[in-house]
Image (cartoon, rainbow, N blue to C red):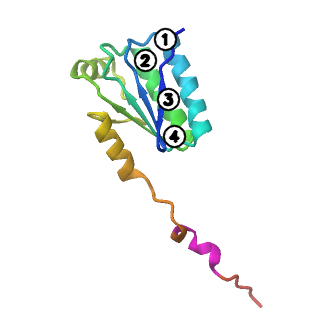
Amino acid sequence: MERVPILKIGSVLLVSIQVDMQDQMALQLQEDLGQRIVDTGAKGVIIDITGLDIVDSFVGRTLSTIASISRVLDAETIVVGMRPAVAITLVELGLSLDGIRTSLNVERGLELLARNAEPETVDDLDFLDEPETTSP
C-alpha cells in the first residue's frame, strides 16, 4: 500500500498529498501522522491538499480526526492548497472540518503557525524562582 510522505521542517510536520486519497491510505496517514507527532514532538502539522481533485465525506472526516488527534498531542493542524472546487464540495456535503485552520499555501501556513507559536523562554518560568512563603 502506498503511504503519504511526512516531512519534518523544524517543529512542523509537512504532509503533501499528491494522489487522490483512498480510504485505507487516509486511515494509514492518520496513524502515521499521530506516531510522527509523538516521535518528533512537532508543534504544527501542515497538510497540503493541492494534489487532491476530490475530497469525499470520508476523507473530510479523516482530516477532522487528524486535527483532533494532533490537538490532543499538542500540535496545531493547518490545511493548505484547497482548490475552490474542493471547498465547494465540502460545503455541499455539510462538512465543517472542525479544528482545522486553512491557508492558501504552505508558505502562509508556516507563517500562521509561527505567529501562533508561544515562545518558550526562561522568563516564562520565573515563578519557579519565587521564594516560598510560610505562614506562622
N-terminal-most mark, 3 or 4: 3
How far apart marks 2 and 3 lie (CA) works out to: 10 Å
**First to last magenta residue range:** 124-130
Image quadrant where residue 55 sits: top left
Q: Which residue is mark 4?
A: 71
- Going 60% across and 31% down the picture, which residue do you hit? 35
- Where, quadrant-wise, is the C terminus in this rendering? bottom right
Which amino acid, by three-letter code, is at mark 3? Ile
- For this view, does 105 lie left or right of residue 72? left
As drawn, the residue found furthest toward the bottom would be 136
Which amino acid, by three-letter code, is at mark 4? Arg
- Going 25% across and 22% down the picture, which residue do you hit? 83
How far apart marks 2 and 4 lie (CA) works out to: 18 Å
N-terminal-most mark, 2 or 1: 1
Q: Which residue is mark 3?
A: 66
Which amino acid, by three-letter code, is at mark 2? Val
Q: Which residue is mark 1?
A: 23
Q: Secondary structure at mark 1?
A: helix
Q: Secondary structure at mark 2?
A: helix
N-terminal-most mark, 3 or 1: 1
